[in-house]
Structures are given as C-alpha cells and as structure tokens.
Image (cartoon, rainbow, N blue to C red):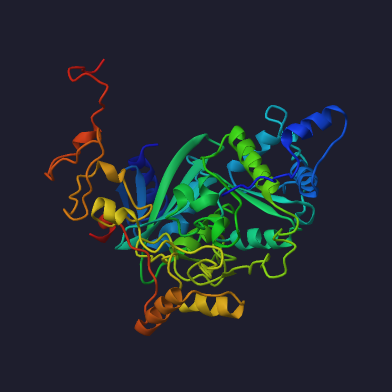
Amino acid sequence: MDIEKVKADILKGVGSVPLKTVRQSLLVEDSKDLLAVAKFLKESPDYRLDYLSSATAADYLEYLETVYHLYSMEKKQGPVTLRVRVKRDNPKCPSLVALYRGAEFQERDNFDLFGIEYEGHPDLRRIMMWEGFDGFPMRKDYQQEDSEILEMDDVDWLDKNGVKVPETLRQKAEELKKQGKRAVAERRAEDKS
Amino acid sequence: MAFTKNISQVDSGLKSELEKKGIVVTTINQLYNWGRRSSIWPMQFGLACCAIEMIATACARYDIARFGAELFRPSPRQSDLMIVAGTVTKKMAPQVVRLYNQMAEPKYVITMGACAIAGGPFIDGYNVLRGIDRYIPVDVHLPGCPPRPEALLYGLMELQKKIDSQEVESAEWYRKDLKREYPVPDFGPNGLVPKFNPEVWQPREEDFRRERYGQPILIGKKNKAPNLDVVTVPAAAAKPAAPGAQTIPAPAPQPPATEAPAGKPAGTGSI
C-alpha cells in the first residue's frame, strides 16, 4: 500500500494529526493520537484493517518504540505499519486492546520485555518472565547476571537448604556484597562502544 | 566415565563350555544389571526440538524398543531415565529438578543436545539455563543440535554400559550417606537462585583459552571463531608448534588471511 496515500487519508479522516513516514511505515508522533488513527484505519471502508498481525517493540536507546502491523482480512490488503515512540523514563503508550483483542498478549509481552506501560490494557502483567523479576531484559541497557559467580543471596539460599558452599565461592560472594555490587556478565566489545 | 566390568571368578572358556551343556553360571550383579539395563523406562518429557528426535527414536524406524526402553512413562514415579531433550529455560528448570527428585531410584539422566548440556546457541540468553547439570547429576551427555536418533541410541547404550558396571553392594541408591535429592531452585529478581548447586557443578577456575590465545575469550560471546583472529602469543607462553601445524602469522592490521579456502585454485573466478 502506498504509505503517502494512507497518510493523506488519515489526515483527511482524523483531522490534523502529526504524522511522519519512516521508510514504509507511519510514525504517530503524539502517542495520544494512536487510538484515533487505528480506529480510522479499522473502520474506514477503504482500508478495513481488521487484523493486528503483530504488536512489537524496539529499543533505540533515546526512546522506545512500539510497532503495530495491521492487515485487512476483508479487503486482502496490508500491511500498514504504525510506530509510536515513548520516552525511556516514562514509557506510557495507549493500548490497542479495545480495538484489537489480539493485542492483549502481545502488549503484555512488550511490557514484560521492554517495560512499556500500555494505558487501558485490561490485564497488564508479566507474561514470559515470572512475577518478581527485576528489569526488562530486551532493553539494550539491561545488565544480565553473571551466572558463573555466586552472590550472597545464592549462598544464603544454599546454606538454608543444607548445601555445602566451597570457601572460594563464599569469599567471592562476600566480597561482592561488601562492595555493594552485583555479578554482571561482561558485554561484548561492540556493545560497550 | 570409567566402566569396570563385572569380573566373574569363573573362567570364561569354562563358562561357555558349561553353557553348551545347558548350565549357566552367573553372578547376582550380572543378572541384576542385565535385568535393569534391558528394561529402562524413560520419562515422556520433551522440552524443545530435541524431543522430536526422541519421538523419532521411539518410533518404528529407529525403534528404541530393541534396547528395551520403549515404555515412555508419563509419570516420574514410574520411570528410571530422564531424557532432558531440549532447551531448559530458567522458568522450566525448577520443574525439571522437581521431576528428577520425584523419580524412583535407581534413576539416570541423559542430557540430549547442546542446549540441555550447556545452553547451546542460547547460552547468552537471559532466559536460558546454561546446562541442567548445574542442578542435577547427569549420567550421559549427548551432544548434537539436535542429536540424530542413532546418537540417542548410542547414548542409551552408553548408559547401559554404566548400569552394567554398577554393583549391588556399593550402589549409590542403597547408600545412606549420598544425597539423591537436590533442592529445587527459586525464581529470583535476576534469574534463578541459586545460580548453580555447588555440590553438583562448579564453574571452571580459569578459562583455559586465555593462555592459548593470549587474551580472554569470553564464553559464547564471539562473532567468529577465535582462531581466525591474529593473536600475539606472549613469548613465555608460546609453545613449540607441532610438526605440520600452521604457523601463527605476525600481527598485522589485515583481514584474516586464513579464511581463504585452501582447496580452491587461486585463479578461479565466479562461475
């Protein structure tokens, strides 16, 4: 589908909404307009984009982005890609669950892995990782644990369960606790730069 | 894994002579182990794509029934063998350990495939356990991605060899001083707590490749094979090259030259 035509139609149908084309996709610059744009695309007789094929996210370091792919089962056309950018420190984005029921689990997945909070989502909680997991592992600044080094939590747990902990591992854990550090996996050289 | 054969007091020649006359001489151990190894009941339990190969092994073409292990039981209480077939995610790991604890003695574990052994291609993943041997003892490690059914049969035969080598008097499941149940890890804020059970598995003290390549090689963090890099080996650590071995080129800022295929003549262009 011609993205410029889609953009012009949305501007005609919804009103003056800040939109930008990024390659073959539409960037909704103000996340508040997302629902109106999606509603227009779903209900307009020219488009009838009634199928949300994917709701995914990406981390661009300066901001987070949610990406929606919309198709039309009725008119056999698509996709139209919508992007919404949210701030890293306040990642709030309107939810599309009201329009597309299929967005529910995918938005939960984005919340789980990227920490994007969807406003209006009926049941926003982690879906892949367990409750009590800290951090959002698909973000680029996520610090993964070093799974070769025991921390004091592990040592305490092992003591509680009657497992012998070798002295060298215990000393290392105590040292880490004294420094107030966490055992973090080393990153690749190209990630550091 | 060292196998010790059951050494019978009876001379093997005499034994075969006696067998011709219809007299069988055996030991309790031999008889007992023959019975146990010929009727292993695996647990019906697959985690990822390796499970497909396991299913193929159980089907008619490869026919694991030839080794007496065709009865896949859906309950850990009824099975002797756990085939950990596939990637063990951190979310699944506590369940796997719990299943192991619930199995009846004597119990054995085969880790099938690279993921179950050490995390495989997903070793860097935040969600993947780097090998189930961090929490439970493993009898046979079966590499491959995934291993072919023949490989699984071979692993089963290796396990049968191990069973053959055990003795009733010293069997670990009859001993009171050995732990045969392992604590089930908990979900923590950054991963599993504990990261491993030091009674079962401990990390290597030092990465042996540091000495060899003159620089730390991070496990699983490479874009290309490390031997394609031009590496300066400190003179003290350098060992005399084996005859016929490729000499290490001098460090120079050039693309790795060793990549050129040796068998191809230099003048061959595109076809």
Q: Is residue A13 visible?
A: yes
Foreground residue among A170 and B38: B38
Quarter of the image with the N terminus of chain A in it: top left
Q: Quadrant of residue B35?
A: top right
Number of marks in the rendered image:
0
Foreground residue among A16 and B6: B6
**x, y percentage for residue B223?**
31, 46
Foreground residue among A35 and B189: B189
**x, y percentage for residue B264?**
25, 21
Foreground residue among B213 and B253: B213
Q: Residue at x 18, y 20 (%)?
A: B266
Q: Is residue B237 left or right of residue B112?
A: left
**x, y percentage for residue B103?**
74, 58
Q: Quadrant of residue B206?
A: bottom left
Q: Is residue B235 left or right of residue B46?
A: left
Residue B16 in the image: above or below residue B216: above
Q: Residue at x 56, y 54 (%)?
A: B88
Q: Is residue B89 visible?
A: no
Q: Residue furthest bottom?
A: A178
**x, y percentage for residue B199?**
56, 67
Quarter of the image with the C terminus of chain A in it: bottom left
